[in-house]
Image (tube, rainbow, N blue to C red):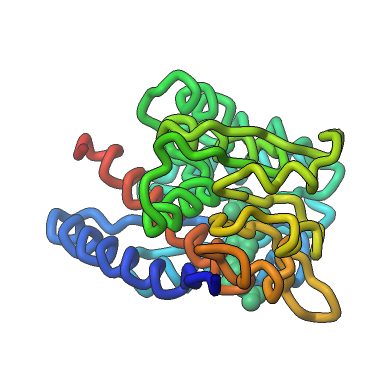
Amino acid sequence: MTAEILNGREIAKDYRAGLAEEVENLKSKGITPNLTVVIVGNDGASLSYVKSKNKAAEKIGMTSGIVHMEESATEEEVLAEVERLNNDDDVHGILVQVPLPKQVDENKVLETISPEKDVDGFSPINIGRLYTGQRTFVPCTPLGIMELLKHTGSLEGKEVAVIGRSHIVGQPVAKLLTDQNATVTLMHSRTKDMVAKLKNFDVVVSAVGQPGLVTGSDLKEGAVVIDVGNTMVDGKLKGDVDYDSAEKVASYITPVPGGVGPLTITMVLNNTLLAAKWNKGIE
Ligand SMILES: Nc1nc(=O)c2c([nH]1)NC[C@@H]1CN(c3ccc(C(=O)N[C@@H](CCC(=O)O)C(=O)O)cc3)C=[N+]21
């Protein structure tokens, strides 16, 4: 079998066209959705993600802002900046790029972002809302993964392995998959014989950050493979999955780059649009 490629760039482009129409519609009502990203420090990769998020926002008619703070910024300064954005009526979505420098407590920052503007869905209130089935901002990478999986058929009754138990990807995507009636096994660094177990799974979602973790011979014939890894190796972006061997066994596979990444950015935009609508009482 040669896998069908889940082309994240193409799927993202179609999705963003729909968002652009909705933005146009909101603008005719006098609302221009705004996404503002806070970045602390000068990490090259982080700066480049932030720029691509802002560019993508503007491309669909939203406005965007960057608050770029010094690596040496204090926790008080970061919290004050978040408060200022919470109180700015022109800002609908706030995203504070993680990781933060060590002097800044990430949990304190996430607790300070207004849940109504937390388009990452990282604040404890929004995580609570997700697990209790309330309206919330669903974290962007899990939402992007679910969008890609819509192109592979129903998840009902499927056996899914999620590798990685982070609050940002593994745990929330396990929740969303369960909601689609898949049976989910959440695997992690202490799972016994992890790679050997993968043969039993219809879908494998790998979110570890370890290039070469999964290879074609580990997979069930016809498995759907979603590669969330993005690790820089010699200046090149690498996923967790050995693509060349996996594509010979899988039915669908996401490349890196050009798979999950573009959908993550798309879902930041999706959530910003929702923030602007909900702020005005539009469903
Ligand atoms: N508060 C917060 N929210 C985030 O969503 C967040 C964050 N912090 N910190 C860092 C990670 C990383 N992240 C990526 C998003 C898109 C691509 C992406 O689109 N990558 C392209 C490739 C880009 C390239 O070639 O450099 C792709 O996979 O095709 C990658 C990484 C969001 N993050």
Picture layout, residue 68 above or below residue 141 = below
Q: Nearer the viewer, residue 200 or 95?
A: 200
Confirm whether residue 50 shows in the render. no
Residue at left offset 30%, top offset 38%: 279
Confirm whether residue 253 shows in the render. yes
Q: Residue furthest bottom?
A: 235
Q: Residue furthest top?
A: 132
- Dividing the image into 4 quarters, which one contains the C terminus? top left
Residue at left offset 56%, top offset 48%: 203
Residue 117 lies in quadrant: top left
From the top left corner, tell me how far across and down residue 32 is, in percent: 28, 58
Question: With 140 as the anchor, is 271 left or right in this view?
Answer: left
Residue at left offset 54%, top offset 58%: 222
Q: Nearer the viewer, residue 57 or 183?
A: 183
From the top left corner, tell me how far across and down residue 269 is, in percent: 41, 57
Q: Please state the quadrant of the image where ligand 1 appears.
A: bottom right
Residue at left offset 63%, top offset 53%: 220
Q: Nearer the viewer, residue 248 or 162?
A: 248
Question: With 193 as the anchor, is 214 left or right in this view?
Answer: left
From the top left corner, tell me how far across and down residue 144 is, in percent: 47, 54
- Dividing the image into 4 quarters, which one contains the N terminus? bottom right
From the top left corner, tell me how far across and down residue 129 is, in percent: 46, 24
